[in-house]
Image (cartoon, rainbow, N blue to C red):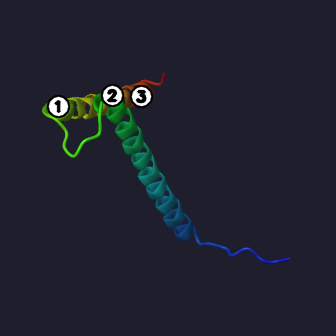
Amino acid sequence: MSQQPQFSENDQRELAQFLEAENAKARIQQTVHTLTDSCWDKCISKVNNKMDRSEEACLSNCVERFLDTSLFIVKRLEDMRGSGM
């Protein structure tokens, strides 16, 4: 039977913070991936060497709306949590 290493309370806290930071990075990467897929499918009709102005405008608007919506949802959830719902 092998013995498991014992971590101090400080080490456990540091490990938990590290894991939370890595999870946050993974969530951000997933959000960027989702945003890229969604906006690409919506705005790009053909792949060329250069995007035209309408595609650029569509991508910019898509990203801005995605971020606005994400921030709205986060704020709404925080408000609900704060009011005890």
Residue identified by numbered label 1 = 57
Picture residue at 22% right of the left edge, 46% below the top: 49
Return the mark for residue 23: none
Query: At label 3, which amino acid type do we have?
Result: Leu
Crowd around label 3: few <14 · some 14–19 · many ≥20 (10 Å)? few
Tell me where residue 37 sits by quadrant. top left
Outermost residue, left direction? 53
Query: At label 1, which amino acid type do we have?
Result: Ala
For the residue labelled by badge 3, is the local secondary structure a helix, a strand or a loop? helix
For the residue labelled by badge 1, is the local secondary structure a helix, a strand or a loop? helix
Give the mark nearer the N terminus: 2 vs 3.
Answer: 2
Q: Left or right: where does residue 16 sit relative to residue 57?
A: right
Looking at the rendering, in which quadrant would you find the N terminus?
bottom right
Tell how many labels.
Answer: 3
Query: At label 2, which amino acid type do we have?
Result: Lys
For the residue labelled by badge 2, is the local secondary structure a helix, a strand or a loop? helix
Above-or-below relation of 5 to 73: below
Above-or-below relation of 23 to 71: below
Give the mark nearer the N terminus: 1 vs 3.
Answer: 1
Residue identified by numbered label 3 = 77
- Rounded to the nearest whole Å, what is the CA distance between mark 2 and mark 3? 28 Å
Residue identified by numbered label 2 = 42
Q: Left or right: where does residue 54 sit relative to residue 42?
A: left
